[in-house]
Amino acid sequence: MISSRKQLKGVVVSSKMDKTAVVEVSRKVPHPIYKKYIIKTKKYYTHDPENSSNMGDMVSIVESRPRSKMKKWFLKEILKKNENIKKWFNRKLD
């Protein structure tokens, strides 16, 4: 079954809020005059019901009904966990 909802892939920038993660999505767009490709980024506030995402994780998000003023996206799945952030926190605690 094909869903009509938009799906995006991005990196979690912040997950400090309860049941919310901030995901940054990057895309390449050609400059209108110079035709050089520029990387544009946008941040999306996503609903993360289990608080399962951490900073640096690669995630897939799906458009959903508005959950709050800023949250209109839902965290579908975690594509790749960030292992470097765990090493950094362990080093910080020692």
Image (cartoon, rainbow, N blue to C red):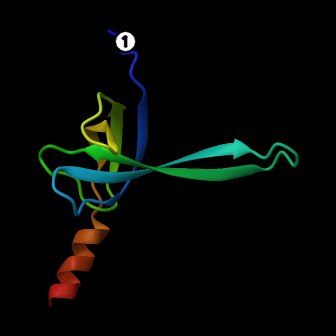
Q: Position of residue 59 (x, y in %)?
A: 33, 45
View extreme (bottom): residue: 94
Q: Position of residue 71 (x, y in %)?
A: 31, 42
On screen, residue 59 versus residue 33, left or right, reads left
View extreme (right): residue: 33
- In the picture, the quarter occupied by the C terminus is bottom left
Residue annotated with mark 1: 2
Examine the rendered structure and indicate whether residue 76 appears above or below residue 28.
above
On screen, residue 44 versus residue 82, left or right, reads right
Q: Residue at x 21, y 78 (%)?
A: 89
Q: Position of residue 64 (x, y in %)?
A: 31, 28
View extreme (left): residue: 50
The amino acid on which the numbered mark 1 sits, given as a three-letter code, is Ile
Front in this rendered view, residue 84 or 9: 9
How crowded pointer 1 is (Cα within 10 Å; few <14, some 14-19, many 20+) is rated as few
- In the picture, the quarter occupied by the N terminus is top left
Q: Which type of secondary structure does the marked residue at label 1 adopt?
A: loop
Q: Quadrant of residue 67?
A: top left
The number of numbered discs placed on residues in the rendered structure image is 1
Q: Position of residue 60 (x, y in %)?
A: 34, 39
Q: Residue at x 15, y 52 (%)?
A: 51
View extreme (front): residue: 69
Front in this rendered view, residue 40 or 11: 40
Q: Residue at x 34, y 37 (%)?
A: 61
Examine the rendered structure and indicate whether residue 10 appears above or below residue 66.
below
Examine the rendered structure and indicate whether residue 47 appears above or below residue 51.
above
On screen, residue 20 versus residue 30, left or right, reads left
